[in-house]
Image (cartoon, rainbow, N blue to C red):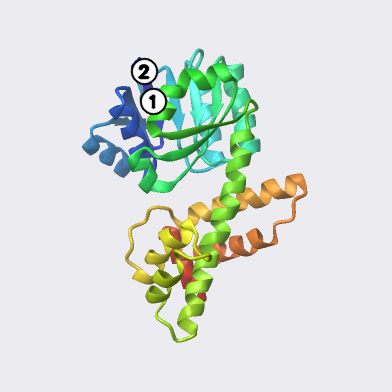
């Protein structure tokens, strides 16, 4: 059954996600505060507006904003309108505490809420092969399954809001560390007088390989002019969320803290809007 969907955040990863929903037969309206993002959505065939209040009435609201603060601002705007009966799918990486707080606000206003962060990046968003960590009341997850299935592989992780975000925290811990480890290793190769690109081809399919090494490694050795698919600032934010969640539960994450310092160092050097593979420049 076709559904009416408002998709908030049609940026680098949000737009291909919204397109997958539309291609599955649902009516999609994009929302984004950035004019360039709205223009890209329009050129791709998705109507886009600058605020959720300007979007037509929808059964489902998909949220793909950048930060917990953005989510809070969006909920501030939404609860002043009509959210009763809607189902909100929070797919942003905002941490367990944020999705619980804002989810309860939405529920108090009469909405249903599904906590469903994603992993897989822009490449898998384009092919509808994201991994989605969905948590919430089973009836709510079932209600939005046609939309979720259009974007990727749904893994139901629990019934409590925050369960999906908690798993994403673990996921982002590994992603944060793996990217920095790849950069350090390729810098080591260069320091040993080797060609990092040649070394990458030799090791990436062996025991030292990782998805991040194969995905980010070529961009690390390609130079500075690579396409931005995930910015340094995203990993400053995400590794910070992991560190905060670890502190709240008393987990020791020394490797994560080192990785966070590298992303922050890159951002401080003016690389915040560059691709996250450029964290390698902190070794130069």
Q: Which residue is depicted at the point 27% across and 41% down?
A: 40
> Residue 258 vs residue 193: left or right?
right
Q: Which residue is depicted at the point 59% across and 35% down?
A: 164
Q: In the rendering, which numbered label is found on residue 235?
A: none
- State the residue in front, 264 or 125: 125
Residue, far right: 250
Write down the residue under mark 1. Answer: 6
Residue 195 seen anywhere in this rendered image of the structure: yes
Residue 174 percent across, percent down from the top left: 58, 54
**Marks 2/1: CA–CA distance:** 10 Å
Check the image and report above or below for 139 versus 48: above
> Residue 95 vs residue 82: left or right?
right
> Residue 250 vs residue 24: left or right?
right
Check the image and report above or below for 96 versus 242: above
Check the image and report above or below for 94 versus 139: below
Q: In the rendering, which numbered label is found on residue 3?
A: 2
- State the residue in front, 256 or 65: 256
Residue, far bottom: 193
Residue, far front: 206
Residue 250 percent across, percent down from the top left: 77, 49
Indicate the quadrant containing the N terminus: top left, top right, bottom left or bottom right. top left
Asked which secondary structure carries label 2, the reply is loop
Residue 151 percent across, percent down from the top left: 39, 34
Check the image and report above or below for 198 versus 227: below
Q: For label 2, count other residues whose C-alpha is less than 10 Å away and answer few (under 14), some (14-19) or many (20+).
A: some
Are dots 2 and 1 in contact, CB under 8 Å?
no
Q: Marks 2 and 1: which is nearer the front?
A: 2
Q: Which residue is depicted at the point 53% across and 72% down?
A: 184
Q: For label 1, count other residues whose C-alpha is less than 10 Å away and answer few (under 14), some (14-19) or many (20+).
A: many
Residue 34 seen anywhere in this rendered image of the structure: no
Residue 88 percent across, percent down from the top left: 50, 24
- State the residue in front, 218 or 113: 218
């Amino acid at each position: 059954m076709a559904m009416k969907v408002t998709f908030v955040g049609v940026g680098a990863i949000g737009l291909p996600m919204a397109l997958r929903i539309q291609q599955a037969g649902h009516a999609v309206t994009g929302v984004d505060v950035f004019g360039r993002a709205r223009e890209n959505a329009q050129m791709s065939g998705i109507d886009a507006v600058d605020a959720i209040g300007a979007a037509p009435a929808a059964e489902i609201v998909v949220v793909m904003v950048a930060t917990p603060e953005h989510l809070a601002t969006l909920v501030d705007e939404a609860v002043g309108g009509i959210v009763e009966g809607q189902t909100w799918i929070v797919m942003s990486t905002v941490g367990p505490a944020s999705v619980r707080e804002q989810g309860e606000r939405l529920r108090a206003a009469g909405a249903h809420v599904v906590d469903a962060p994603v992993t897989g990046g822009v490449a898998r968003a384009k092919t509808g092969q994201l991994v989605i960590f969905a948590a919430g009341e089973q009836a709510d997850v079932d209600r939005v399954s046609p939309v979720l299935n259009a974007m990727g592989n749904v893994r139901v992780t629990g019934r409590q809001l925050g369960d999906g975000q908690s798993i994403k925290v673990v996921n982002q811990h590994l992603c944060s560390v793996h990217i920095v480890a790849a950069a350090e290793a390729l810098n080591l190769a260069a320091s040993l007088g080797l060609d990092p690109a040649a070394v990458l081809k030799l090791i990436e399919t062996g025991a030292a390989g990782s998805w991040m090494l194969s995905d980010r490694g070529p961009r690390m050795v390609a130079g500075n002019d690579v396409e931005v698919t995930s910015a340094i600032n995203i990993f400053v934010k995400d590794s910070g969320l992991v560190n905060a969640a670890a502190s709240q539960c008393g987990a020791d994450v020394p490797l994560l803290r080192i990785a966070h310092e590298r992303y922050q160092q890159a951002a401080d050097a003016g690389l915040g809007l560059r691709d996250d593979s450029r964290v390698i420049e902190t070794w130069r």
